[in-house]
Image (spheres, rainbow, N blue to C red):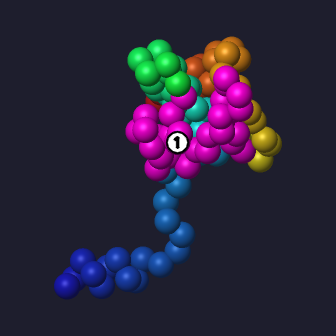
Amino acid sequence: LALLGWNLTRGGTPPVVFTPTELDAGSRFKIFLAAQALKVYRDSTGTWPSSLDAVGFGNEGLTYEVVDTTYVIPATIGGAPVFYRSGDNLDFFRDASRELIR
């Protein structure tokens, strides 16, 4: 009961766990991981999955759209629209992992 009272009297804003830069890097790295999972799915089945649920990324806040024989993952990172299209260079997304290491 004392802990509940302490939590209720704290008020204020919740602590900042991740900086905006870390949140952006996390989004980019999620796209990198999703792209890897989609490639593995395509290599093993010969087709793109109907949704990110099939590769375990359905609840990660990403969207995915198949366009002909390719796909695109659109996102907003740092307030700017970013698109990963299958076959594009993944370095920008992969290198985000370096920003997440503390």
Left or right: where does residue 76 sit relative to residue 62? right
77 in relation to 5, above or below: above
Residue extent of the magenta highlight: 48-76
Q: Nearer the viewer, residue 38 or 1?
A: 38
Compared with 97, 63 (above or below) is below
Residue 54 visible to the viewer: yes
Figure label count: 1
Looking at the image, the residue that sits furthest to the left is 1
Q: Residue at x 49, y 19 (%)?
A: 46
Residue 45 sits above or below residue 13 on the image:
above
Measured as percent of width and height from the top left, residue 71 is found at 66, 29
For label 1, the SS is: loop
The residue carrying mark 1 is 51
What's the residue at 67%, 16% (across, down)?
87
Image quadrant holding the N terminus, namely bottom left
Of the pair 1 and 27, the residue shown nearer to us: 27
- Tell me where residue 82 sits by quadrant: top right
For the point 54% across and 28% down, the residue is 48
Instruction: Name the amino acid type tagged 1.
Output: Ser
Q: Residue at x 67, y 23 (%)?
A: 69
Q: Quadrant of residue 96?
A: top right
